[in-house]
Image (cartoon, rainbow, N blue to C red):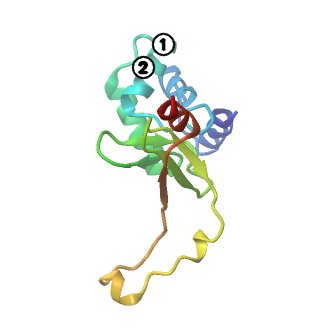
Amino acid sequence: MRHELLRERLRERRWRITPQRRSVVEALSGPNLHLTAEEIFARARAVVPEISRATVYNTLRELVEMGELAEMQIGPGPALYDPNAVVHHHHLVCSGCGRIHDIHPLGVKHLYLREEDRDGFELQRVEVVFHGRCRACEESEDT
């Protein structure tokens, strides 16, 4: 469903939706989705076998520049792409399996950074990442 809303917003922007671009947008469909460019490439290629990596990477870059896709760096490894870029949210990451969930915790929007801690930075937004272990990882450790 999210990819349909994204496609509609892209049409309103008069962004040309080719079969290759459509396959990338459709690859970004699913709950709590945070994929690498290579994972998106594999999903898009399953729909349009002739799609190139360059097309996927260029499409991702364009979507990030438009604000329709968020590029995230959580820990080491490749960047992840989050299609839930329109609604500001935070993340919960399992330190066992690496699974990531979008969350909307209470009290986060009232975080305050003291002037002396800002080191001259003008704050633009706050991103919080909570780390823990999911139920499946906890249960597998208990057995």
Please provide percent x and percent y for residue 133: 50, 44
Q: Can you tell which mark lies on residue 92? A: none
Compute the Cα span from label 1 to label 2: 6 Å
Task: Please tell me which residue is depicted at 42% across the width and 86% down the height of the picture.
Answer: 114
Check contact, mark 1 vs mark 2: CB within 8 A: yes
Residue at 58% across, 38% down: 135
Above or below — where is 19 with respect to 81?
A: above
Mark 1: few/some/many CA within 10 Å (<14, 14-19, 20+): few
- Residue 38, horizontal then vertical, whole percent: 36, 27
Category of crowding for the residue at label 2, using alpha-carbon neighbours closer than 10 angstroms: few (below 14), some (14–19), many (at least 20)? some
Q: Nearer the viewer, residue 99 or 96?
A: 96
Q: Quadrant of residue 41?
A: top left
Q: Which residue is farthest bottom?
A: 116
Q: Quadrant of residue 97?
A: top left
- Indicate left or right for 2 with 112 as reference: right
Amino acid identity at mark 2: Ala
Q: Amino acid at mark 1?
A: Ala
The x and y percentages for residue 143 are 51, 28
Q: Judging from the image, what secondary structure is the residue with disc 2 in?
A: helix
Residue 77 shown left or right of residue 39 in the figure? left
Residue that protrudes farthest toward the front in the picture: 143
| Residue topped by disc 1 | 46
**Which element type, helix, strand or loop, lies under badge 1?**
helix
Picture quadrant of residue 139: top right
